[in-house]
Amino acid sequence: MRKYSVPSRYLLDPPTDRYDIDENNNNATNDYTQIKKEYKESDDSLRKAVQEIAFVSRAHLHEARNKQNMVPKDGRQALLPAVSALHYLEMLEKVNYDVLHPMLNAAPEAQRLNVALLLGRAWLTGVF
């Protein structure tokens, strides 16, 4: 936590109105501006931490993809969760590594269908 200076209270109880902060509110107090500044700093720190973890995860998944030929065909089913992980990492990249973005929490039908098709293809071909 201290590496990225993310206060734990923001991770356990994220702000719900961070997308609805009114920039033109003239009645804002110093406390409000201080809290807003802390939210922005914690968001940036959290985004950097998530980005670093995503890069490492993607590197591990690509290494696993390169070495999947060494895994017996019957054991390749154990690699199927990597398909969902790769899809989630792509979604994270689209939202600029913001884990609190609403797009990541709500899975529309099209996204579920896409993941199901990717899983089916990986299961049938044995390649993820």
Image (cartoon, rainbow, N blue to C red):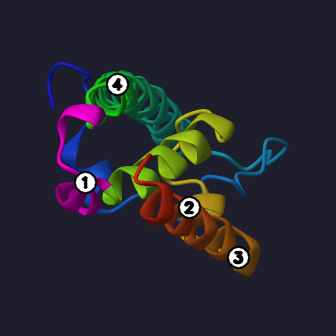
Which quarter of the figure is the N terminus placed in?
A: top left
Q: Position of residue 82 (x, y in %)?
A: 35, 50
What's the CA distance linking mark 2 and mark 4? 17 Å
Q: Is residue 29 left or right of residue 3?
A: right
Q: What crowding class fits label 1: few (fewer than 14 Cα within 10 Å), some (14-19), or many (20 or more)?
A: few
x 54%, y 45%: residue: 32
Up-down relation of residue 75 to residue 41 (above or below): below
Query: Disc 4 designates what residue?
Result: 66
Magenta stretch, main secondary structure class = helix
Question: Mark 3 is on which residue type?
Answer: Pro
Describe the element under mark 4 as helix, strand or loop.
Answer: helix
The residue carrying mark 3 is 108
Please tell me which of labels 4 and 1 falls first in the chain: 4
Q: Please say whether residue 73 is one of the residues in the magenta stretch.
A: yes
Q: Nearer the viewer, mark 1 or mark 2?
A: 1
Residue at image x 48%, y 64%? 124
As drawn, the residue found furthest toward the right would be: 24
